[in-house]
């Protein structure tokens, strides 16, 4: 069928976490060679685009989100030439490519930051970051008491050339991730150049990490004393994205800007989606929502209403590289997600979680707008919660005092084939995967699920096939239908109805001509609990 334009309004985008997707070199870490070897999996799945988490040179203090060079590829993953070949090979399969840009901060090994350290207080080099003297008689106290996005403090003290204690520098994340000063025109010009660098190489979109954090109140007020939060969602950030939009619009083919925007205020959130700013943003309201019919309906209504105000398409996200996998999350008594309450070791019914994750996938893919699939969710993988502490790499784990287990549990390398680790993730005889894979994943490999009509993989393949072929799906409108308590039923015109039963008992399906797809077995014309069905109507 003819492609719907603009492509990003209704795209299904698959997130690749490069170090865990596939390993082509045999060192136990995923890479570009592994991605290239499995592009047919992605085209067979039916996705429209892939989004790659950072693949730039990095000391890997935060899994690549501490970037030391925004215009190259980390040797761990391959070369720039390999990246350009991968982009071309994806395009040949009709798959667009989105890269992850991290504008809030860089690595402490970035040449700019190293130059700032060497130049000393009062230098132009330090103006590119947030260097400040400390408080107290000897400057021994941090400039502010701000708490960071990774918990913990947000300032680290430097050492002067003569060995004496020096200024402090700001890092909203780990100490290895100093924040840029976005009030400086050189910073703005640098990132505009970085965008052009990747657009010139055929990249179709930019995912913007921590998009609302760039600007800081230069007065550095404490959070409690500030009229507005001193580093969350300052108004000036919108001019940055207007300049980026002007650059994206210069390129043919619809280059998309996609924001990671965590904001509870719906109006503030949609400000980023005004016609001259970002094209889309992640819907964290939906991602964190409980498996509850009333809460989900309210979330869907809120999402549709707020996006309509600025003419932007909604996006629907069940998971990413930062959150507990749906199979685990939906198998718990509390099915919400929060960074503050990650609950490793909480009693979990994985069978119930699996059933609900299947139902959630069809619900998500039927809603108007775009959708994201996190790698491995199409296989029904669960959160790996028994990673030995010595193997954990996420800085959230130590920075929380070893309370928060971190995000490694959703980043375990994918199982492709075979009956034992590394399950085809790496070539035979390679190093062990960088994180251990559960032995029970032998039933969750791509190989084991291919051709099994009851598998999660075939459910996703069929859902995406229908989504491509049925005009009602993707971007557009929806209308709620009358339904029993605990049931979400909505129509997408023409002739499509989605019914999700979140109650505890089977319900009658509405009148229909055909069941296109169901997340689980039906009981005649009755839809069991925790099951979603797609119907073709008269």
Image (tube, rainbow, N blue to C red):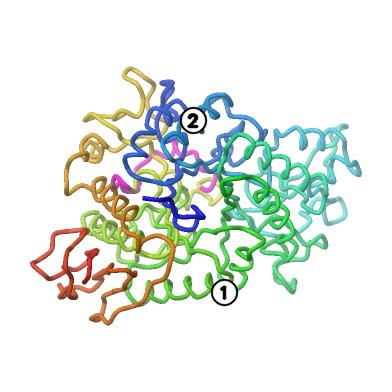
Quarter of the view holding residue 69: top right
Q: Position of residue 342 (x, y in %)?
A: 43, 57
Q: Which quadrant would the C terminus be assigned to in this image? A: bottom left
Q: Residues within 10 Å of mark 1 (few under 14, many from 20)?
A: few
> At x 16% / y 68%, what residue is drawn?
513
Farthest-out residue, right: 122
Magenta span of residues: 378-396
Quarter of the figure with residue 494: bottom left
Q: Which one is in front, 366 or 527?
A: 366
* Identity of the residue drawn at 68% across and 40% down: 196
The residue pinned by badge 2 equals: 86
Task: Specify the quadrant of the image occupied by residue 347.
Answer: bottom left
In the drawing, does residue 209 fall left or right of residue 165?
left
Q: Position of residue 18 (x, y in %)?
A: 47, 35
Q: Is 390 within the magenta?
A: yes
User: Is label 2 in a helix, a strand or a loop?
Assistant: helix
Q: Nearer the viewer, residue 355 or 252?
A: 252
Read off the residue under disc 1: 309
Q: How far apart are the two marked residues, 1 and 2, measured between alpha carbons?
A: 38 Å
Main SS class of the magenta portion in the image: loop
Q: Say which residue appears at 55% left-offset and 58% top-offset.
A: 280
Closer-to-camera residue (368/505) = 368
Residue 252 appears at what percent x and percent y?
61, 45
Is residue 388 shown above or below 209?
above
At label 2, counting other C-alpha atoms closer than 10 Å, the crowd grade (few under 14, some 14-19, many 20 or more) is: some
Mark 1 and mark 2 lie on one chain; the one further toward the N terminus is 2
């Amino acid at each position: 069928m003819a492609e719907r334009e603009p492509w990003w309004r209704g795209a299904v985008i698959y997130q690749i976490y490069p170090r865990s997707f596939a390993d082509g070199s045999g060192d136990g870490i995923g890479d570009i060679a592994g991605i290239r070897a499995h592009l047919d999996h992605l085209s067979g799945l039916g996705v429209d685009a892939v989004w790659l988490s950072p693949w730039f040179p990095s000391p890997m203090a935060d899994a690549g989100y501490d970037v030391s060079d925004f215009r190259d590829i980390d040797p761990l993953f391959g070369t720039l030439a390999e990246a350009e070949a991968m982009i071309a090979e994806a395009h040949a399969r009709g798959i667009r490519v989105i890269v992850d840009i991290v504008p809030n901060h860089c690595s402490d090994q970035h040449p700019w930051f190293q130059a700032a350290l060497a130049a000393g207080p009062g230098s132009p080099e330090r103006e590119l970051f947030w260097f400040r003297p400390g408080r107290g008689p000897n400057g021994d106290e941090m400039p502010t008491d701000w708490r960071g996005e990774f918990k913990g403090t947000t300032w680290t003290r430097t050492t002067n050339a003569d060995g004496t204690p020096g200024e402090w520098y700001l890092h909203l994340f780990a100490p290895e991730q100093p924040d840029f000063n976005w009030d400086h025109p050189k910073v703005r010009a640098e990132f505009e150049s970085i965008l052009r660098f990747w657009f010139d190489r055929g990249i179709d979109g930019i995912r913007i990490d921590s998009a609302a954090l760039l600007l800081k109140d230069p007065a550095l007020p404490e959070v409690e004393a500030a009229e507005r939060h001193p580093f969350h969602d300052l108004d000036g950030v919108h001019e940055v994205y207007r300049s980026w939009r002007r650059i994206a619009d210069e390129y043919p083919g619809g280059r998309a800007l996609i924001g990671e925007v965590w904001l509870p205020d719906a109006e503030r959130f949609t400000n980023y989606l005004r016609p001259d700013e970002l094209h889309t943003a992640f819907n964290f309201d939906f991602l964190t929502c409980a498996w509850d019919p009333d809460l989900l309906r309210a979330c869907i209504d809120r999402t549709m209403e707020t996006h309509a105000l600025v003419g932007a398409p909604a996006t629907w996200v069940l998971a990413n590289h930062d959150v507990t996998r749906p199979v685990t999350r939906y198998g718990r008594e509390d099915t919400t997600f929060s960074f503050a309450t990650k609950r490793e070791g909480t009693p979990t019914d994985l069978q119930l979680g699996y059933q609900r994750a299947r139902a959630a996938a069809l619900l998500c893919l039927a809603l108007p707008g775009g959708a994201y699939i996190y790698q491995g969710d199409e296989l029904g993988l669960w959160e790996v919660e028994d990673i030995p502490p010595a193997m954990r790499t996420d800085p959230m784990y130590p920075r929380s005092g070893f309370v928060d287990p971190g995000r490694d549990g959703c980043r375990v390398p994918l199982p492709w084939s075979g009956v034992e680790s590394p399950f085809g993730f790496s070539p035979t005889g390679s190093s062990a995967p960088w994180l251990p894979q559960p032995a029970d994943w032998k039933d969750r490999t791509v190989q084991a699920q291919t051709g099994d009509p009851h598998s999660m993989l075939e459910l996703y393949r069929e859902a995406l096939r229908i989504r491509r072929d049925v005009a009602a799906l993707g971007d557009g409108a929806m209308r709620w239908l009358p339904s029993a308590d605990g049931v979400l039923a909505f129509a997408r015109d023409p002739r499509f109805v989605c019914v999700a039963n979140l109650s505890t008992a089977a319900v009658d399906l509405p009148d229909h001509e055909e069941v296109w797809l169901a997340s689980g077995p039906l009981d005649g014309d009755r839809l069991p609990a925790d099951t979603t069905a797609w119907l073709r109507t008269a």
